[in-house]
Amino acid sequence: MVIDKIKMSKQKLLNKIIDEQQKIIENLEVNVERFRKASDLDEDSTLNPQDFSHQTEAKDMQLRFEKMLNSSRKDLNFLKNLSPEKLNRIEKGSMIETEKKYFFVGVSTANFKFENKEVICFSEEAPIFKKLKNKKIGDTFKIGENELKILNIQ
């Protein structure tokens, strides 16, 4: 029964993270389209060298946003395929619960609230992952001036 409650809690949090990831994707899609339009100059118009410079900058930004969009779509796919099963150690896909916060390893999103706690999502490349990597339930770690105790790992 407790395991089922843990699975449900993790699944609810995953659903919220998926929602946040979809917002990121929607924003990136808007930016890709905006820079695609800006880089598509009408060749029949009278153009000066500055117009070509802006076109090149817009195309560069479009390509950058497309790269971020592809990465965000991969992150979304990872989230959708993640199992809510309890994990024994902190790894990609882990949800770490402390007294005041939840931490999720695997994707970066803006912080948000879930069950009256702040949720912080980060990738394995983030410095905080190195602090948490070998921790287990009952261990503590510091973030800034705050010392947090790990209550659960899912």
Image (cartoon, grey):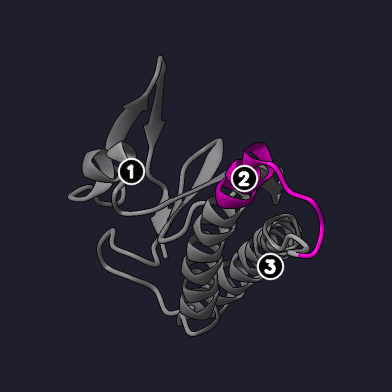
Say whether residue 52 is magenta: yes
Quarter of the picture containing the N terminus is bottom right
Res. 45 image quadrant: bottom right
Label 2: element kind: loop
- Residue 101 as seen in the image, left or right of residue 130: right
Q: Which region is colored magenta? A: 44-57
Query: Mark number for residue 126?
Result: 1
Report the Cα–Cα distance between label 2 and label 3.
12 Å
Label 1: element kind: loop
Depicted 121 relative to depicted 4: above or below: above
Amino acid at circle 1: Ala
Label 3: element kind: helix
> Please, which residue is most extreme toward the top here?
145
Report the Cα–Cα distance between label 1 and label 3.
21 Å
Residue shown at 63%/63% (left/top)? Answer: 21
Name the residue tied to disc 3.
Answer: 22
